[in-house]
Structure formats: structure tokens, C-alpha cells
Image: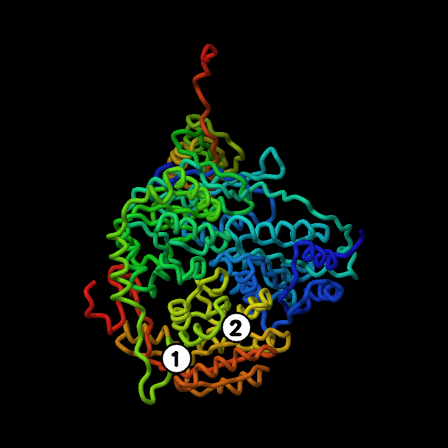
Amino acid sequence: MNMNGGQALMKALENEGVDILFGLPGGAILPVYDPLIDSSIRHVLVRHEQGAGHMAEGYAHATGRPGVAMVTSGPAATNIVTPLCDAYMDSIPMVVVTGQVPYAAIGTDAFQECDTTGITMSVTKHNYLVTEAADIPQVIHDAFYIATTGRPGPVLVDIPKDIVDPNNPRSAMEWYTPDSHDLPGYLPNQAGDAELIRQAAKLICEAERPVLYTGGGILKSRGAEALLELAEMTGIHVVTTLMNRGGFPDDHPLCLGMPGMHGNYTAVTAMQEADLLIALGARFDDRVTGKVGEFAPLAKIVHVDIDSAELGKVRRPDVAIQGDCRVVIEELVKALKEMGGSEAQPDRNQWRSRISGWQERFPLTYEQSKGDELLKPQYVLEQLRDSTPSDTIVASGVGQHQMWTSQYWKFNHPYTWVNSGGLGTMGFAIPAAIGAKAGRPDRMVWAVDGDGCFQMTAQELVTAATEGFPIKVALINNAYLGMVRQWQEMFYEERYSEVYLTRDVPDYKMWAEALGCVGLRVESPEEVGPAIAQANEIDDQPVVVEFRCEAEENVFPMVPAGMSNSDVVVDPSQRDQPR
Amino acid sequence: MSAADGGGTTTLVVRVENKAGVLARVAGLFARRGFNIESLAVAPTDDERFSRLTIVVGVDAAPMEQVVKQLDKLVNVVDIRELNPAASVERELMMVTVRADPEIRGQILDLVRIFQATVLNVGYDEIMVSLTGSPSRVDDFEGLLRPYGIVDVQRTGKVALPKLVKAAPDPLAP
């Protein structure tokens, strides 16, 4: 079938199962926006290209399918660099199509030209500059394959204008449906080594104080069920890193919740005291380990990861298994069953009682606001958690509100937590929530955002309003760049430098309304529940609820940067407790 | 200590797809992961789909295991061999132009003979020679020429292949 490159691009995207595309047109990508009209793919017109990227990420987080964004060349391409890097750090499958100046003009500093593949080389799993229209079907097929297999990640496809422009003879091509990949350097391996899996099983059967340290690889591999079986069969407690919140139910008695810099005391301490860490799809990030040399000093390490470069990158494992988390866990469960299953697990009652002792002495805690104090963000999050369906998808920005959300929410379903972990991208919440809602229109989607974050990407609420994505935003307004303020309070002798954002400017309620949303403002604890109930009722418009919160509230527990996890600082009210 | 001494370095032979931008991907990876390239030689292979990079890496710069694993993640990198200098044959080509007034040209030609180097070009007061040899031999030659005044020198960086098996398999072995 004869067609032009632009038609081929649309057809190739359709063939990959793309149902929604987040984008914004411009000069170089313009010819592709014409065949888009005739395509089955829905396009969501964003207000800033960064929004398109984060929406694609949110879509991928919530559905497991690759998110797709399409933008033009030059400034549009540079605007989407942040989402690419975010997706790269958090292993999010995403395909970004960028327009490029005509092939013959590349390298001439043409209007809206930039070296997109050069700029994005270090923040993508792979990228392509397509030079011939005839390459489009194969490159798109390869791009989706690379983005979604092995360790997932973003792939960028840069397409010069002339090969998609029907008025240019270089765009003429014959359609073909690619059915294979010629990628001799890319051979992702799923299965783990059977002997190593047996060794891991043996270590598990010998361990007195084991902990399952589970990361984003659980969710990426669709491995939550396998993890549940492993944990229940062995009775081993599970910590869920920021990237695996929801990968193991918070309500489960074996769940210890989030470890790390703002993890709860029990999750942090159980890892410190463990004699075996079974790291599944986790990468020993500095926010989890604290001072690496003093992290889990007594523990042997079993490390399972699809990316062999993670094995031994930070901590030398005793057993290193390269493979897909779900596949390896299933094999591990089999190996453990052959060794006697739960019968073969040693008596760990003493360990269990130590864990429950920590849980009793050091629960998450805060003091409810008194008198005319403003709201406590933790209270807002508890109320929000308790008055939304348990499968609500929660997206967050980056900072204190993100940590409180991870701490206080009960994630009992996989793929309900959408956040920026590795890159820590402020402004992630609103576009990511829109992407999640686009992927899961059946679910309630709340974005929990800070006032600093909100001001970075609020314009995408216009996209939500006009494109029909009735997300809800819980805006934790504490008038500060709160996490930075907390660090200045704790580590810079309360010398506050450029962290005050003001309380009343902008007027968030009016701004929300101007953006096409319902705007609500809450200032006292008794208003919190009713406002949430009102927001939950609205399903034809986005809602922003501004919660006016105390500025001085800090996130605890906290392991100060560079310190050992054994030096975790608990809430002031718990500091007299014996450790 | 320089790469040519073979000390503190490892040689990686990296087969890559012969596609635009692959060298930039490899070089960029070294830069952003903080690995140091001592020398780099690039050439096509007998199979036109692939090129071979011979990269000499300072081993103190980063754990070699991470270098190899991160390189291997590049989609265009097909395979990587790590060559231990003791188990490989290494060669490097140097072209050098040296000051050679007619009265001292003879001394330089003595060195050329001793090292079995080749005279490539002669000027009225300069001489251009080339030497192919192990990197340390090339270093020695360059060192001996230096007092005469090196005008220009170009070295290719090392290329290497693993040493071959010496003992033939026992035909009577089961």
C-alpha cells in the first residue's frame, strides 16, 4: 500500500495498540497532525510539552502499557526532556515522537532545530533519528519493543519533516508490517539462573531475620501476586519502597511499608537489623540505604533485577540473579516448596516480636492542630484516604506532601500510586494524574500536590477540563517549598533562604476556577471531610481543593542525608522511647 | 602511568552496530558515568553491519564490572570482550615527524633500524617514520626520538586480539 511517512507513523502507532496520544503540534510535526484526524487514536491537546510527557508517564504507571507523547522540534523537544529523564530514572515505558527540521536542514541551525537525539541520549533507553520514510514502520515497532521489554524505559523517535510531508517526494513509501526486530545488541533475558535461585531459597530457609526489600521491579513485572505468595508462604515481612507502594498490600500483616529517608521506623530498622535482605526489583537507592557503608550491616543480600548493571552497583550481593522479578519469584516459590515450603522456614517468633515491638513504640504520628492553627497535612491525607474508594489512584508531586502521602495512604492495590521517585520532578502530580485518568477512566484519581509543585504545572488543569478528565487535586498549601524549608530548619540553623512562596498569592480557588475546575478552600479540620465528599461527588469537571496547612510541620521519621539508617530521627513525641 | 604501559588499564573490545551516532553513545556513556577513556580505536569489521571499538579504560576510574554492564545496556552494543594484557596481543601504530638535520639523520636511521620502523617521508631537515608494535615498544621508540625534537606525532591507540591456544587438543583424548 502506497502512503506517506505521516500516514505510516499513524498506522504504526495504531498497530502497536496505541489508543491515546498526548501532544501539542508545531511546525516540524505539522504534517503528522493531518493523518491524525483520520486515525483511531485519541489525541489529548496539552498546554505545555512537559505535560504531555508526564501524562504519558501517568498513563503507563496506571495501566502498565507504554505511554505515548508527540511534540514538535526544538523547544518542544527540550520541554519534554524532563519527563524523559523522569521516565528513565523510574523505568517507565514511554515512546516520545518528536518532529525535526527537514533532513537536509539538520545541522544548519534551522528554525526550531535542536540536536534532539544528542540531547536525549543520556535520558532515554534508546533513541532514533529516522532518515527515510520507509524506516518508520520498523523503527516504531522496535521503539515499542525496547520501551516495554527488559528494564522498561523511554524511547524517543525523532522524525524529520520531509519524510512525513506528503508534498515532499521523500515521504513516499510502501507500507509493510514489521514482524521481527533486527537488534543484535538487545536480547532481554527473563528467566533467572536455576542454581542461583536454589541458593537464594537456601539462604531464605536459613535466615532468622529476613526482610523482603521490594522495589519498582515488582510492579513493572506484574509480580505483585507472586510476591504475595512468596511472603505468605515464608512468613517474611515486606518493605515496599517508594516505587513499589501498592505492590504489596499495606493492610497485610506482613507489610512494613516504606523504608528509607522518610520511611517508617520499623521498615528502616528491620532492614538495619536483618540477617538477610531479599531485594526484588530494587536498586539500593541512596534514599533507601542512607550511608551505604552502614546499611543493613549484618545482612546477606539476595538481589534480583532484570538489569544486571544493578547487581553489585551499590552493594555486593551474596546471590545475584538477573531476571524478571515475577518469573524469578515464581521459580523461587517453586524451589522453596521443594525444600518443604512453609514447614522449612525456621522459627522466627523472636524476630516477629521485635518487629511488632517497634511498630507499637514507633507508629507514624503527628499532633492534631489546636485552636486557630491551620490544618495538619497528615490529617488531611488520613481523611482523604478514609473517604475515597480503596482502588483510588493517587498521583503526587515531589516534596513533603509526597512523603506524607506515601506514609499515610493505605495502598492495597497495585498501580494505584503514581509518583516521581528517582528524578524527584516537582510538578509531576497534575499531568501524571491526567494520564492515569486517561488510562483508567473507571477509577477515581486524586492528585496530591504541594503549592510549589502546583504552580509548576497547573496549566494542565485546562487540559483536564477541556479534554474531559475529571481528576481531583488535593492541594497541600503550606505557603513554602516545604521540604527545603524543613532542611533549612534542621540543617541550616533555621536560616530560611528563598523558600517562602506566600500564603495568598496566587488565590488557588480563583485560579482553579479560571482553569475550568471547581475550586474549594478548606481551613479548619471540620471542613475537611465535607469538602472531600463534595469533590468526590463531582464527576464532570476537575476539582481543586486547597487545604490551608501549617507551614512548620515536618516529615518524620527522617534519616538525615549521609547518615546511617541506624540514626533515624523519630517524631519529637517519640524521642524518649527506648530503641 | 600511561595507557601504553598497560598498567592500571584494561582493554575492552566492543562490537557495535555500524550505525550513525553509536560512537557518541559509547563516549557519552563513559563521560556521564565518570569512566575515563585512555585511548580509543574504531574500525569496521569483516561484517559491514558491525564496527569494532578497542577502548583502553583506566581501571581506577570505576569498577570495570560497572563499565562493562553499562556498556552492554546500550542497544547498539552487540558484545564486549575484556582483554587482559597478559592474555592478548596488542599493537599500536605511531607516525612521527622528527627534526633531522642532515648531520644527525644517521643517528635517527640507526634507531629506525633497531626498532624495525619504516621511513615514510624525508625532508631537508625532518624525517617522518612509522612504527607498529606493542604499546610499550612504541613508547620506547617515541622516548628515544624525543631528544631530537618531535615535530608531530600521531598514535592510533591500541588494538588487540586474544592470544591463541598453544597446545593442540590431544587427538587420543576421549
Tag shown at residue A430? 2
Secondary structure state at the residue bearing disc 2: helix
Q: Nearer the viewer, mark 1 or mark 2?
A: 2
What amino acid type is highlighted by mark number 2? Ile
Instruction: Return the residue nearer the eye: A283 or B131.
Output: A283
Tag shown at residue B16? none
Instruction: Return the residue nearer the eye: B148 or A178.
Output: A178
Q: In the rendering, at what x and y percent does residue A34 appear?
A: 74, 66
Instruction: Return the residue nearer the eye: A102 or A463.
Output: A463
Residue at (49%, 49%) from the top-left corner? B27
What amino acid type is highlighted by mark number 1? Tyr
Judged left or right of residue A247, residue A18 is right
Secondary structure state at the residue bearing disc 1: loop
Snapshot quadrant of residue A196: top left
Residue A72 versus residue B81 in the image, above or below:
below
For mark 1, what is the residue?
A: A480
